[in-house]
C-alpha cells in the first residue's frame, strides 16, 4: 500500500522515538510466516515488553540514523521486522530465540545492543543475558555472601565451646 508523505513522516517519527529510547534492537526476516504465526510473535513480544514494527526499509533507515540503533542499518534488506526493547538488553533476543524454536521461517539478521552490532550467530549469547531483576538478585547474593560467612564463623566459636564443655561433662560422668 502506498503511503503519502505525511504518513511516511509519522512512521519515521514513531520509529525514531522508539529507537532513541531503546537499549536493544533486533532485525529479523519474516518471509514465510503465516498471519497466525505473526500474531503469536507479537503476543510473545508484548509479554516481554518488546515493541515489534514492520516498516519499509527506506523509512527505517531514515528513522534509525543518529540513534543507538543505527548499527543495524547494514542488515536492513528484504521484508524485515524490527524489535525494540526499552529496558532489557536481552529481551528482543529472547523473543526471537523462543519463537525460532517453533517457527524456523523467522531468520534473525542481526541485533543492536547498546549501540553495538551483534551478528545473528550470537543470538543465544545475548538471549541468555540475565534480566534486570535476575542481575540484581545475583549482585545481592554476592554482597550478602561475606556477611553470611562472618555470621556463621561467629556462631561457630560458642558452638565449639559448648561441645567441648559437654564432652568434658560427659567424660566426668563416666
Image (cartoon, rainbow, N blue to C red):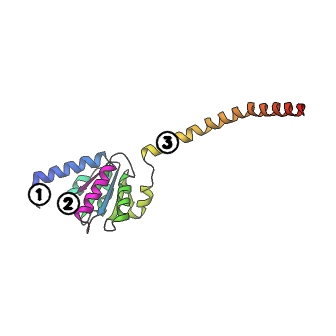
- Tag 2, which secondary structure? loop
> Badge 2, how many Cα within 10 Å: few under 14, some, many 20+?
some
- Tag 3, which secondary structure? helix
Total numbered labels placed on residues in the image = 3
- Residue under circle 2? 56
Which corner quadrant of the image does residue 161 belong to?
Answer: top right
Q: Is residue 74 above or below residue 171?
A: below
Which region shows up in magenta? Answer: 30-58
Which corner quadrant of the image does residue 71 belong to?
Answer: bottom left
Name the residue located 36 percent from the left edge and 58 percent from the top edge.
111
Cα distance, mark 1 to mark 2?
A: 10 Å
> Badge 1, how many Cα within 10 Å: few under 14, some, many 20+?
few
- Residue under circle 1? 3
Nearer to me, 50 or 65: 50
Nearer to me, 13 or 102: 102
| Residue 10, magenta (yes or no) | no
User: Which quarter of the rendered picture does the N terminus lie within?
Assistant: bottom left
Name the residue located 88 percent from the left edge and 34 percent from the top edge.
171
Counting residues from the N terminus, which is met first, the one under dot 1 or under dot 2?
1
Counting residues from the N terminus, which is met first, the one under dot 2 or under dot 3?
2
Amino acid at each position: 500500500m502506498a503511503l503519502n508523505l505525511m504518513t511516511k513522516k509519522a512512521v519515521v517519527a514513531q520509529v525514531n522515538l522508539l529507537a532513541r529510547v531503546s537499549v536493544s534492537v533486533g532485525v529479523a526476516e519474516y518471509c514465510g510466516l503465516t498471519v497466525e504465526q505473526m500474531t503469536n510473535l507479537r503476543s510473545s513480544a508484548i509479554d516481554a515488553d518488546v515493541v515489534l514494527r514492520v516498516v519499509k526499509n527506506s523509512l527505517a533507515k531514515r528513522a534509525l540514523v543518529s540513534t543507538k540503533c543505527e548499527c543495524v542499518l547494514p542488515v536492513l534488506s528484504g521484508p524485515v521486522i524490527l524489535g525494540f526493547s526499552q529496558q532489557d538488553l536481552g529481551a528482543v533476543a529472547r523473543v526471537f530465540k523462543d519463537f525460532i524454536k517453533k517457527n524456523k521461517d523467522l531468520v534473525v539478521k542481526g541485533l543492536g545492543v547498546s549501540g553495538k552490532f551483534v551478528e545473528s550467530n550470537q543470538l543465544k549469547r545475548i538471549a541468555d543475558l540475565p534480566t534486570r531483576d535476575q542481575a540484581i538478585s545475583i549482585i545481592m547474593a554476592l554482597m550478602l555472601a561475606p556477611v553470611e560467612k562472618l555470621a556463621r564463623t561467629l556462631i561457630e566459636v560458642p558452638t565449639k565451646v559448648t561441645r567441648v564443655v559437654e564432652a568434658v561433662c560427659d567424660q566426668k560422668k563416666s
